[in-house]
Structure formats: structure tokens, C-alpha cells
Image: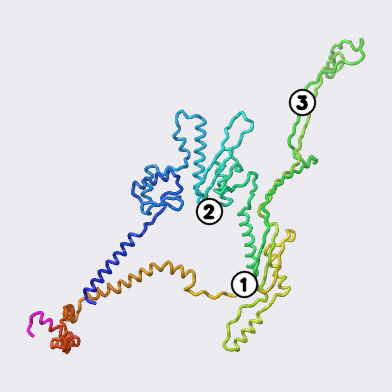
Amino acid sequence: MDRGARLRWGAIAVLLVVALGAAAMFYRQPDYKVLFSNLSDKDGGAIVAQLSQMNVPYRYTEGGGAILIPSDRVHDVRLKLATQGLPKGSVTGFELMENSKFGITQFQERLNFQRGLEGELTRSIQALAAVQSARVHLALPNQNGFFREQQKPSASVLLSLYPGRVLDRTQIAGIVHLVASSVPEMAPTAVSILDDSGKLLSQSPDGNANAVDMQQLNYTQQIEQQYVRRILEILEPVVGKNNVKAQVSAEMDFSQTESTSEQHRPNQSSDAGVVRSQQVVESTGEQKPPQPTGIPGATSNQPPQNASAPVNGANPAPQAADGQNAARSASKRESITNYEVDKTVRHTRGSTGSIKRLTAAVVINAPLVAAPAPAAAGAAGAATDAATVAAAARGLTAAQQAQLLTLVRETVGYSAERGDSVNLVSTPFVQDEVPADVPLWRQPEVLDMARSLGVPIGLALFGAILLLGLVRPMLKGRKTVAVGGQLNAIEGEQLDRPALAAPAVDLSPTQEQVRLEQARQLAKQNPIAVANIVKTWINGEAT
């Protein structure tokens, strides 16, 4: 291939590479990211109008749930839209109370408060990771002091979850208590939570869930797996890792029971009783003289005698007309003691999630085969290995099975009063045939990797072929020839000239052709001398 052809092919290759690069840049789609999602129709229309004015390309997701724009302009566009108040959002909170008018009525004020509270609760619930959207409805009765029984408030929550997301029992209880704590005098039982399919997620007002609780099922499975792991840990060191299988079935009791009992013992001794209250009343004073008594007559009606001073002794007490003392001293004491009546009150609540009954089944491979020893050389070694394996194969005796059964019962906490059942069986296992190994080139992982890397590898091979087949020969032809390059260039120029027509009859070489061939042979044999001769010719030096 001459130099002109190489240059033409090189130019074509360069143009092809440039065209491929331009096509790749042109057809490469920019990376789109979510600008806003879960927008209302009003906000979506306003945002799309603003994007069209700002010359920002956009697209929608399937179903129109989100607006996508190039990833390098997401933050810039969000800030520009925020300056215009977009998106406004369909959920409003207590900002409704900030724009209250002067002549607003009490009913309108109460309605705005209810709407603001619903909006704030909606925002709080939507902040959860699994909740896509939510709606809260509050029923706030008008409190009136003329009614004897006031109606309690209630709430209803409608949740729309992300695809593949679920709420467990604790999350639902958290939403219930969030709503109940935000409204005064609202009980948690007055909150109802529904999903977008209309299924009731919260418990019924009486506290009993109608559907099967998944948390209870998960707890039961965890208990069963824990017992299985205990059995395997205690038996595998004895019988081998692959020689035991166990299954445990637990019957759980999730019922909630409460009991209250009172006990009275009123008849107690005074020293054992506890004094509740004691009252003591004492009164001291003078008692009026009694009324005159006796037979009416002259003797009883005589006036008292004159007082006389005795010579020795104390003066007698003055006598009344009846001959008795005029006044007497009197005292009174009353004591009242109240003892406590013996009373014992017991309030018992049964724990939930207790084991009601336990059933375990254990299967042991029989006969047990120990690990084979290293193989010996020759036929004698093979016979020895077979004898060793046969000797290692052993079955379980009745005593060994009884010991293993005792270990299993102690591991699971066997209780005859509870009605537990534990069985251990020794039987040979069926060995399944091991499927043949799939070739590497037929494995699904390798096929997926080949499909994903096929296009890049193909493009790389095409580029290598293009580089090695066209570009490299062109660059190699343009290198300067160190020794004998002048002759090769002259020879190449002569080949580019149009050749003369050959003689019609005489095909023998001419003298010029012979000399040229001799010069070529001389240049090939002694290139240094020929190069010096050409150098002297060029410099004009005499030979």
C-alpha cells in the first residue's frame, strides 16, 4: 500500500472515529433525577409551565407521579421555583390562623383551627419512611356546659404506603398515639387507621384485633427456631453435623387475662388489730343538788338550824333545808376506738406470649458413619479403608437413644404438666444424588455478565482493530528512515511514476534496469557505503 492510500485510509479512520464519538455524545441521554413527587394537579401544572419558561427539559415517570429533570440542574431549579412559591402544596397547617380576617366568626375560627390541626397531623404522618401520603379527619364535638355527658372527639386516618412497604404493629400504635396525644380528651381507642385498600390497620375499639397478628406469628417462629438451634447444638457434637434433624412446634398463648380478688378478716383480737381512730371524751363539773324527797310534813319543812362554831374540830357543812349538801362534784369519761377491717386486694394480669404446649421431633441418622481415615496406597490400602468404614458404621442402642432423648428434653424444658411431647427416632437418611456441576460458560451469573459486558467489549475490539489496522501502518510509514532512507524514497518515487510500455517482442532487461538492480543489491549489502556516496553527491564533494 502506497503512501497516498495510507493517508486516505487514515483520514477515513479519523473521520469514522470522530463520527462515532459525535453520535455517542448526541444520542447519550442525560441523567434525570426527581425534581418533585406526589404533586397535586394544580402544583404540577404550575411547575411544568415554569420549566417551559426556563427552557429546562423534563419528563414524567410512569403514571405521572414525579417530574424528572437533568441531575445537574435539580438544585438550581428547586431554588428558583422556591422563590416563586412553588410547589404550594395541598397540605396546609396552622398557617391558616395567620391570615385570619377581622370580622371572622367563632364558627369559622374553630373550623380553621380544625383544618390546621388536620394539616399538621398529616405532615407528621407523611414524615414516616413507609408512608407516601396521608389524610386525617378529626371529629371535634362542640363542648357545651349545658349537657351532662360530653361527647368525646374521634379521628380517622387514611394511609397510602409506598409499593412493597408495610407497617408493623408498633408503627401503627405509634401513629394512633400521635393522633390521640395531639387532640385533648381523645382516647387511643377512638382513632381508626385504614390503608388505601380499605383494610383496617388499627385494632377494634374493644382492643381485640380481628385479623391474625403478624408479630405474633414472627414471635412464634423465633421461639421455634431458638429451640431447634438448641437441640442441634447439643446433639451435633455427639452424632455429627449432618446426622441430626430437628423440628419444634410451639403453641403460644397470647390471651390477656386480668383478675382481682378481695379478702376480709374482720374478727381479730384487739392486740392484733390496727387502730383506725380513737375518741376519748372526759367531762368534769358540779352536779346540782337533788330535789327534796320524803314525807311532806312539819318535820321535813323545818328551816335549817343556826350555825354553831364548835370548840374543837372543823365547822360542819352548811345544811340545806333537806339536810343534804347543796352541791356535789361530778366527772364523766367516754372512749370510742375504731379498728381497721383487714382487707387484701390482688390484681393479677397474665403475661402474653407464654408457651402453652411444646412439641419436638428429632431424627438421627442410623447407622452413624465416622469420618474416613486417609487412604493408603495400593489394594491393601483400599481394603483397609473399606474395613475401617465398615467398622465405623454403628447404630444407636436403646440406652443411647434414651440418653439422647433425656438431653433433648432437658434442652427444651420438657414439662409433663404442660402436656409437652418430645420424640427421638433413629433411622437412615436418604442420600439425594448430587447434580452434575454446570459448566462455567452455562452458569446464569456468567451469562448475565457476558450480556452486560458484550457491548463495551465489542466497541473496544472495534477500536483496537481500527487502530492497529489503519492508524498504526500510517504512522509507521511516516517514520524517518535512518540508513538507506534516501534510496528507498527515490525508489518509492520512481514506482509512483507511470511505467513505460514494455516492448512487444524483446522481454530482456535493459541496461538501465540492470544498473538499477545492481544499485539495489549494493544498497542492501553495504548500506553504509551507499549512504556515504549519496551524502558526498549531495554536498557536491568530489569522489
Q: Between disc 3 and disc 2, whose residue precedes?
A: 2
Q: Between disc 2 and disc 1, whose residue precedes?
A: 2
Location of residue 114 in the rendering, given as x and y in whole percent from the top left corner: 52, 37
Mark 3 = which residue?
Answer: 283
Q: Nearer the viewer, mark 3 or mark 1?
A: 1
Our reading of the magenta stretch's main secondary structure is: helix
Q: Callout 1, which amino acid?
A: Asn
> Which region is colored magenta?
534-543
Q: Nearer the viewer, residue 83 or 271?
A: 83
**Left or right: where 419 falls relative to 469:** right
Location of residue 245 in the rendering, given as x and y in whole percent from the top left corner: 64, 69
Q: Quadrant of the N terminus?
A: bottom left
**Left or right: where 384 falls relative to 50:** right
Q: Is residue 150 above or below residue 33?
A: above
Mark 1 = which residue?
Answer: 242
Q: Nearer the viewer, residue 498 or 248?
A: 498
Residue 40 lies within the magenta run: no
- Mark 3–mark 1 distance (CA, rounded to whole Å): 97 Å
